[in-house]
Image (spheres, coloured by chain):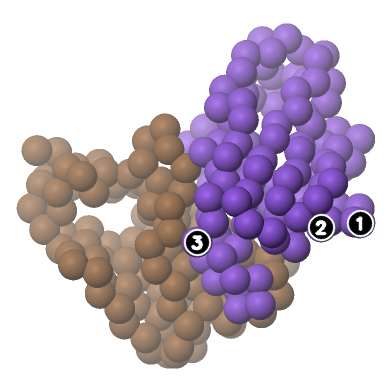
Amino acid sequence: GQQVMQIPQYQHVQEGEDFTTYCNSSTTLSNIQWYKQRPGGHPVFLIQLVKSGEVKKQKRLTFQFGEAKKNSSLHITATQTTDVGTYFCAGTTGGFKTIFGAGTRLFVKA
Amino acid sequence: SAVISQKPSRDICQRGTSLTIQCQVDSQVTMMFWYRQQPGQSLTLIATANQGSEATYESGFVIDKFPISRPNLTFSTLTVSNMSPEDSSIYLCSVEGDEKRNTEAFFGQGTRLTVV
């Protein structure tokens, strides 16, 4: 079945350092979404990428969708303590089902 | 966007009992999704609930264990039946912002279940 793999599982960074999480799908995706879940909270939508090679930015966050629409990345520049949480990618293949990656838990040390 | 009210937010239950979780959406939606998130893990889809028909369960989940109701287009319940400690998890309901275009998912606040 369809799988969405996400790495790393967790990462510790010093405040001000950059952070990147990667997702890979076993099949071509129609779109990919990114969510952030703060400790004790529920997933909150960040962005959706639809086009091959698409790049979107939200302040310090940069999202990329691969040319083959099978991989994606989220890069955070100059992390802050407010960035702490788990970042999930989620892919769909055209049906209504969304498959979540395992998530990358980000720890930021002040 | 969609606003989802989910309750209870948490509960501690005895093994062998059942808990029903409710989700209320502020708009009409065709499909509602129920997920389970075990501690430190990702979200696993339990089932998709359509109004007026039986829920569709994912592999590893059965109706007898997780009966779902969907009486109208704004409400759904998930029951965790005959609970065991292995059912301790966070349960989340979800809807899509635009069902026709596979847009973002909106989640309820989650129900943190502990079975003792």
Q: Secondary structure at mark 3?
A: loop
| Left or right position of A41 against B5 | left
In front here: B14 or A20? Answer: B14
Instruction: Classify residue B2 as left or right of residue B87.
Output: left
Which residue is disc 2 drawn over?
B50
User: Mark 2 vs mark 3: which is more N-terminal?
Assistant: 3
Q: Which chain is brown?
A: A
Residue A52, above or below A76: below
Which amino acid, by three-letter code, is at mark 1? Ser
Residue denoted by label 3:
B1
Chain of the residue under label 3: B
Q: Is residue B91 above or below residue A67?
A: above
Residue type at mark 3: give it: Ser
Q: Quadrant of residue B65?
A: top right
**Could you say where residue A25 lies in the image, as x and y percent from the top left?**
54, 72
Q: Residue at x 65, y 71 (%)?
A: B99
The image position of residue A55, as x and y in percent, is: 31, 82
Mark 2 vs mark 3: tell me if same chain.
Answer: yes
Q: Residue sitting at 60 percent across and 36 percent down?
A: B6
The one nearer the camera, A6 or A42, is A42
* Residue type at the position of mark 2: Asn
Q: Are marks 2 and 3 in contact (CB under 8 Å)?
A: no
Please name the residue shown 75% across and 23% down the image: B19
Chain to which mark 1 belongs: B
Does residue A91 appear in this view? no
Do labels 2 and 1 touch, CB within 8 Å?
yes
Which chain gets the purple colouring?
A: B
Q: Please give left or right for residue B41 compared with residue B31 in the image.
A: left
Residue A29 image point, x, y percent: 57, 79
Q: Residues within 10 Å of mark 2 (few under 14, many from 20)?
A: many
